Image: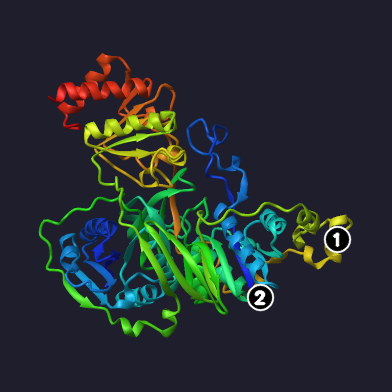
Amino acid sequence: MNKALKIVVLAKQVPDTRNVGRDAMTPEGSVNRAALPAIFNPEDLNALEVALRLKDECVGSTVHILTMGPLRAADIIRDAMFRGADGGYLLTDRKFAGSDTLATSYALSCALRQIGADLIVAGRQAIDGDTAQVGPQVAGWLGLPQVTYAEEIEQIKDSSLVIRRRLEHGIEVVESPLPAVITVCSTAAEVRPQNARLILKYKYAATRSELIGDNESLRAEMVAERDYLNIVEFSASDVECDESQLGQAGSPTKVKMVEDVVFQAKESKVLTASDADIEGLMVELMASHTLG
Amino acid sequence: MNNIFVYIETEDGAIAEVSLELLTKGRQLATQLGVELEAALLGHNVAGMERELAAYGADVVWVADDEIFAPYRTLPHASVLSGLLKAEQPQIVLFGATSVGRDLAPRVSAALRTGLTADCTQLEIGPHTDEASGKEYENILYQIGPAFGGNVIATIITPDHRPQMATVREGVMRKELVEKAAAGQVKSIDWKSYLSPADMAVTIIDRQIDERKIDITGANIIVAGGYGMGSKKGFNLCYELAEVLGGEVGATRAATDAGWAEHERMIGQTGITVRPKLYIACGISGQLQHTAGMDSSATIISINSDANAPIHKIADYAIVGKVEEVIPKMIKYYKQNSK
């Protein structure tokens, strides 16, 4: 029988940058970020599935989400609970605002020290940044081994995991001792759907801030009675950390300038499919040595 | 001290293309700053590679040669590279945005407590004034690249921490032999002093790396097809045109997902970046996801029956017409006039 594992999944709520429709475009051709829906970062869902499968295999294991973000990011913790996670931690504080990947990973690593975990699983990267940095940086802060681009846990051993990695041009199978940080890529198994029984069980789950001014409600009563509905909320002072390393002040990188990507009209020559147009084009391209 | 470092990636005894591309860019920046360009080469049986690295502009090649460094594993590379960088204190360190570089660079940035910018498409040197404090900086590295899912282009800087670190995708920079290569001074990394037993914790059990069969990043002419090709059969027109013109075939994500072209041909945000002499976009609407990977092509021809398709706006020649009509005519008139 496999040993029970305490697993923490790092997840992020992100704007859906993949499907920028016409309604999210400004007349100038740039993206209106506020118009994009907030979603569970896709590869973090793959990470959650890896964690839930380990929980299935190792009786007594627990899976908790750790996310840093605004209060509404508690939505993804509930979403994960509806799929089989046991609970979660929301790291939320204005002091975290403006964090780059190094400051974010520092804050997460402080929370992880507090929580304690045998295994930390994260999505390879978030679609709003595509940096793939936070996972390895968390491992770096904690001094743990990291296995990136993980696709599947092939074998669970007493104090190690055998993990298949998906690289650009092939696969690699590695064995890593625990505790470790694993980042999971999109070719891993898809996350299981929400479960009706779990939705009923966890739909009232809330953080303390979500219950403020809500004392009389059914939800407040439920959370007070049932500890498993309590989503733990951490502020900067709740986790032991050096506050100078948080937020904008703790971020080595600064954004100097942001330009919207705009479809710039070149001096296009507009042609038709007529024989004269196409022959003219081919002759012109050959004359300029673009062709041939 | 305060030089520029490039992390050199190797696979099966060969230097990765992206490392040579970074040396070319690093050479430019080093010359502009009046500093030296140094390469960090961690691998096994790498003797002789310093000549190639020097040919692409490296003044100094730092070498750690041992079987523990090949194949690549995170911890030995991260500990030794972090140790070397702490000792040498470069101002800039560049990595390829490969599965190795994207695994290693963030780990090193955490060890050095410095910033890292992913997937830069441009690197430039320039001044900076901090608006809040009024503090002025000279010769800062502008780390420029797409952000927010490719919907904006951001210029990131690391004003107060060193080194300034960035990753760059393969194919984004051009590699170029230098005219008068330096001799390529080889220095040994004192790697044993940077390693601890814990760095050996992860072991590789199996590894199956394919020879890259398809590689269109170096092609001068690319004929790319999108969902507008209609079907796998329709998509074959792209192959016909590419063959006649001596080019390679590329594809959008939609065409790749539909199974009309191999994954290696996917161009764009989630695929590869190309910059051929001539790019022919067939049945492609021109979403940012795709254009991010091809918009620096020298000449762009777009073929789309929708006159309002965004692709026409970035094209040098916008052909408003059906692909099944236009492509056979292009083949016909190319053959007729090339005789």
Say whether residue B224 is visible.
Answer: yes
Looking at the image, the residue that sits furthest to the right is A216
Element at label 1: helix
The answer to whether marks 2 and 1 sit on the same chain is yes
Dividing the picture into quadrants, the one containing residue B150 is: top left
Q: Residues within 10 Å of mark 2 (few under 14, many from 20)?
A: some
The answer to whether residue B295 of the structure is visible from this angle is no
Q: Going 83% across and 65% down the picture, which residue do you hit? A: A226
Of all chains, the one bearing label 2 is A
On screen, A17 above or below B79? above
Mark 2 — residue? A4
Mark 1 crowdedness (10 Å alpha carbons): few <14, some 14-19, many ≥20: some
Question: Is A27 left, or right, of B63 in this rendering?
Answer: right
Q: Which residue is nearer to you in this view: A151 or A133?
A: A151
| Mark identifier at residue B199 | none
Which kind of residue does numbered mark 1 sit on?
Met
Quadrant containing the C terminus of chain A in the rendered view: top left
